[in-house]
Image (cartoon, rainbow, N blue to C red):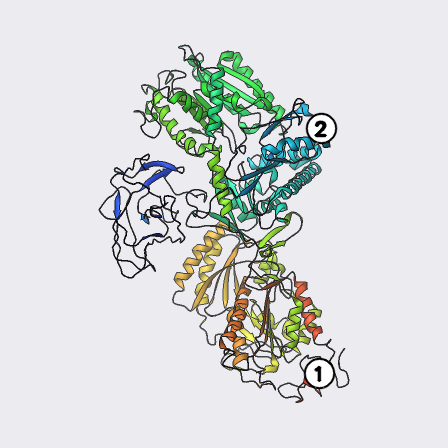
Amino acid sequence: AERLGGAALEGVAGVPLYSTAKDYPIWKSRVLELPAGARPVPYAYVVHRAGAFYRWEDGPAGQPRTLGLSTASLAATGPVCVVVDELGHRDGAAGTGGGGGGSSLQRLESDLSEPGIEPGPLGHAPAALPLPQARHADPDMPPTPASAGDAYHSPSVQINSADGVVVVSYRLPVKVRRESTLPSGWDVRWDYDHLLSLRTSQMRVTRVGMVHLPGEAGPLSADDEAALERALRPFECVPVFVPEEEAKGLDVFWQQTLLPTFNHLMDLYCSDSTRWTHYLRERTAWHCYTRVNNRFRRKVVEVFNEGDMIWIHDLHLMMLPSYLIRELKVARVGFFLHSPFPSSELFRSLWCRDDLLHGMLNADLIGFHLYEYARHFLTCCRRILGLTHTLDDRGNISVQYNGRNVSVVCVHAGIEKPVLVRTLRRVEAEAPAPKAQPAQRMKIISIDELSRLTGLAVKLLAYEEFLKRNQHLTSKVVLHQRVITGGTHCRELGLDETALRTRRIVERIHRMFGENVLVFEEVDAAADSLEARVPLYREADVYLVTSLREGLNRMPLEFTFVQHETRWSEGGGDVPGQQLPAASNDAAAGGDGDPLAPLELGCRPGEGMGLIIASEFVSCMRVLQGALRVNPWRFADLVELLEHAVSMTASARAARHVKDWAFVERNTSVQWSHRVLLDLKSVKKSNSRAQYSVMGLGHSFRVLGMKAGFNSLDITEVVRAYRKAQNRVIFLDYGGTLVEDSASDDAVHHFAVAAGLEEQPAPEAEVLGMLGKLCGDNRNNIFIVSGREHNSFIRSAVAGVENLGIAAEHGYIYRWPQRLGIVSSSGQLDTVANQDGGSWHRLLPNFDMSWTTLVKRIMDVYVHRTNGTYVEVKGCALLWQFRDADPEFGEVQSKELEDHLITALKNFPVVVLRGENPGREKKGGYIEVRPVGVSKGIFVSRILNHFRESPQRRDSNGVRLGEPDFVLCIGDDSSDEFMYKAANQYLAEWRNRQPSPSSSPLVEKAPSVFTCTVGKKPTAAAGYLNSIGDVHALLSSLLRSNNTRHFSTPNLSSMPTAVGAGYDGLGLGLGGGLGLGRGRGGNLTSLGR
């Protein structure tokens, strides 16, 4: 506390405040607990930047606020004290406690509750200072999507020595070369330029990847591979050896397909484009890409230990999560993308877009350096796969994917200061920095890889124009352009043309202004290193980055650090953040401000702090707030920024450097990795493999998150319970359960069905036959429960099945099986001629439907507003379908419509519902208005209660035959979830009605209740069937169980002797008894088939 300037706050433990875009600028804390009867607790607000201390609130920290607590004990249940403050305002005590009771804890509670605060590390100190709520936020701290890896993590989630992580990258962070003098034959050293080269003692780290070998190493024999593997063991690196042909194929797919697309380049008109003109070469490259990912999968599984986390990196391994999850279902898998993610318009031009998205989403956590990239990813998930995402109160983003929540985090990487300090000291020892000379030029440096993406031509053309405008500066400035060749872009299309064009511009500048204005050097990638860059950083006055599109680029961060180490102390400045130079703005950058005066240098070369000009398409531009931002596509702006940079005064340069240093100093690569791994460890994942079911083949393979106990429906158990039951009730959904629901995936067919232009397909004759035979059993009561309009059922073949109950419009209109003879005059409908003459009833008799006119008019307004939407009438319900609309615009319009309908219909007994369309690809959703009290669940409860409450005879054992003892519910979409809950509720109510065994000697056997969904998906059902064919097979099994039982003497002796009592002449094959006389399925002389 003394180090931070708060001597009076000794032994404190900070409490973070949270805000969201909705709550901003109100910040809230979690629930805090303090010892009862404690003395007044001092506290103060402190502002952090980038996870580190920035400043105390206005006023000295030695005069903290005080939270006065009552000496009387407070009740620990419910809110006791809510503190409301404003940052910088001190109006006495923040709040007081009150109440009574004898609890040993006093509880401070805010709106954002989160139990489980653990004691701080200082022992005697309270768990945390009470900062429940603040009503003012520092302007420098806008709410952003936070990483859970910061201080926002639960104290129970920490990285410790017992944790392990397998870090998987395409290239291992080591430099390897043959060395015959060494026992292993290989010289292995850390590659400190690699982001993942850091070592830590906090956890066990295993690195998996390919080894980058110099060209002279040649092909490796089996002995060479074994020796290299042994040489890498001390570095905790495990190599993956990939055949040269597969490695080249992966590079082709990465550099000619993925890299251009992810960097917003379309090679549509390029004759050499793999994607557009060489189909077979593209497919071959894709197969190599997937095979290499599979090789990595085998190696990761080999080194994986139970409980380890797996952290996968970048574009080369986007399919690896899908392959790993097949064998390591319970492992926590993270994937971090270091390149930009393209907009949905570009990404969906990839023919393998679905495979790549499924590959990423099979990870548990997906990381990006910027929220901009994450936003593009979320949009692609929404538009291509129909997936939605949520943002919780703490700013954590997650995508709902097959019953799993995939976390999305945004954490920008930094640099490692000890590595830079060591390198800088070594460089200074070898070549001390030269003192500034009067004739020395102001040095502009730029380090880029040879690629179209780095904007080399744009940069050189802008520099050429700068020299034309300011020819008097040709003796005062120099651009040192270093181009790295043979790097990651070595297989890029049109690379030779890019190099030729760059050299031509360089030659033209040399001819026009002399060779001293431009130093152009080409360096092989093997020779490029941090040690080779540091001398340039040290001597430069301006660092120029003009990339047209680039992900992570840490060179501007390195430049800022070297400049601070070499120039800040030499200039006599104080520590950044404590005191800024007097002139801290750019107003003085142009000398006397005369626009007609010749441009002059703002400071002597080598004396002012280095300045950064960075393209706004580079990720570091978002975190270096002091850099000059430029759009490289705006040529004139780039020229003007060059003039602005060279004329900027030393004080303005220093002020900008301070802003850049604030991020570089606080955010290191160690902190970046620690935050991401904390996020990954925080993922809630069950250790039970049974809760993760698999679905799909090939690259569409994915893991579904299921509740505990969710398994395939045991047909044998269902048939066994069916045989024993005397009063069975079966509820079957229609579309998607009995018949294929082609309209769910075919937008045109769905519209045609909704408009009444086409009919849904009827069940096959075989299915209708099975239903007819099952309904012929008097112990069976079978209902088709559908959302279709009842008129469509009247005209369908299903209505002709004798004794089949039908519930249309989610149960609002229904008919009983004919043999029950139930007639209700108050609810009976006037219908068109019905094949079976059955009566149709309303769930809500005499319900007022006048609201439909108003709803139709409102929905029509939004139909005209939103292309691809239409109104669907389903009897008592009206739906506004936006499945064919633009996903995001349709979602926005649906929310507006939902609010409009809720307001307009508040005086009507209706409910406004939001639903999601079923199908392989989730296509939007719908807004539905229907009467209150209408759902499939309510209908199921009504039917089951009717059978339970109806007077029925009892058998010889005293068991009422009328109460259902077998209930089966099968559905396939979200509307069927209510059926499952109603069936489970019926079982729960039955158990509640039963007396205890001690009070009643006769305890009835519980009814058998089975709930099942078609297809593996997150559901309230207890089991699943894979397809509609399995539903038909189940019905066939139930039917056969009636006709295949062979009766023994005990069976015959236990059969009832009464004939026809309660049953209409049952024949053989009805499992529970043998009837004599007129019966279906048997005769007097046949005892079984």
Q: Which circle marks residue 452 in the picture?
A: none
Residue 696 in picture, x, y percent from top left: 64, 52
Element type where label 1 sits in the image: helix
Question: Which of 764/129 is in front?
Answer: 129
The furthest residue to the left: 92
Q: Quadrant of the N terminus?
A: top left
Element type where label 2 sits in the image: loop
Q: Residues within 10 Å of mark 1 (few under 14, many from 20)?
A: few
Examine the rendering and report whether any part of residue 319 can be seen.
no
Examine the rendering and report whether any part of residue 871 can be seen.
yes
Residue 561 in picture, x, y percent from top left: 44, 26
Q: Quadrant of the C terminus?
A: bottom right
**Quarter occupied by residue 487:** top right
- Amino acid type at mark 1: Pro
Residue linked to disc 1? 1050
Q: Is residue 368 above or below residue 1016?
A: above
Question: Which of 331/90 is in front?
Answer: 331
Residue linked to disc 2? 219
